[in-house]
Amino acid sequence: MPFSARALEEKRARLGLVECMNHELLQPYPVLHEKPGDYVAQIKFTVLLMPNGSDRITSHPLQEVQPTKTVDDPEIKAWLALGVKTKKKGGGKKKKGMVEVQGSVF
């Protein structure tokens, strides 16, 4: 996770950064820049990755922004209409002795 060396209070901790960099325990975070005329949005949040899916556990409330341009391509509109969450597969484990008949479990 990126952090700023300025946030370290102890001078010894800052000296330890050089040693960590020399042994490739830390990697420098590249400076991000945009081309002139590009639109950029940065959103930071923490995601909990689990075997059955992911959850956003921290975030900030987003401001409602009204777009100034519209999407006219029907194919792109169809992609934008799709949800971002994956649907969980049903089923799960069945109890021993249960029999499935045409979608019903008895």
Image: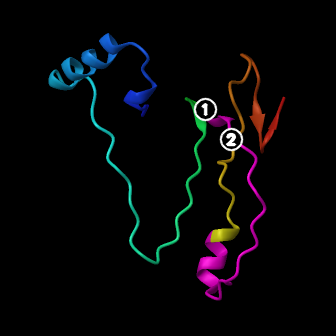
The residue that appears at 37% across and 28% down in the rendered structure is 5
Residue 64: image location, x then y, percent: 78, 62
Which quadrant: the N terminus? top left
Residue 71: image location, x then y, percent: 65, 83
Q: Secondary structure at mark 2?
A: loop
Q: Which residue is mark 2?
A: 88
Mark 2 and mark 1 residues within 8 Å of each other at the beta carbon: yes
- The residue lying toward the viewer, choosing from 62 and 101, is 62
**Amino acid under disc 1:** Asn
**Amino acid under disc 2:** Lys
| Figure quadrant of residue 96 | top right
What mark, if any, has residue 104 been given in the picture? none
Q: Secondary structure at mark 1?
A: loop
Q: Is residue 102 above or below residue 83?
A: above
Q: CA distance from mark 2 to mark 1?
A: 8 Å
Q: Which residues are magenta?
A: 54-79
Q: Which residue is mark 1?
A: 52
| Figure quadrant of residue 25 | top left
- The residue lying toward the viewer, choosing from 38 and 70, is 38
Q: Is residue 75 magenta?
A: yes
Residue 90: image location, x then y, percent: 72, 38
Q: Is residue 34 above or below residue 76?
A: above
Side (left or right) of 50 relative to 25 = right
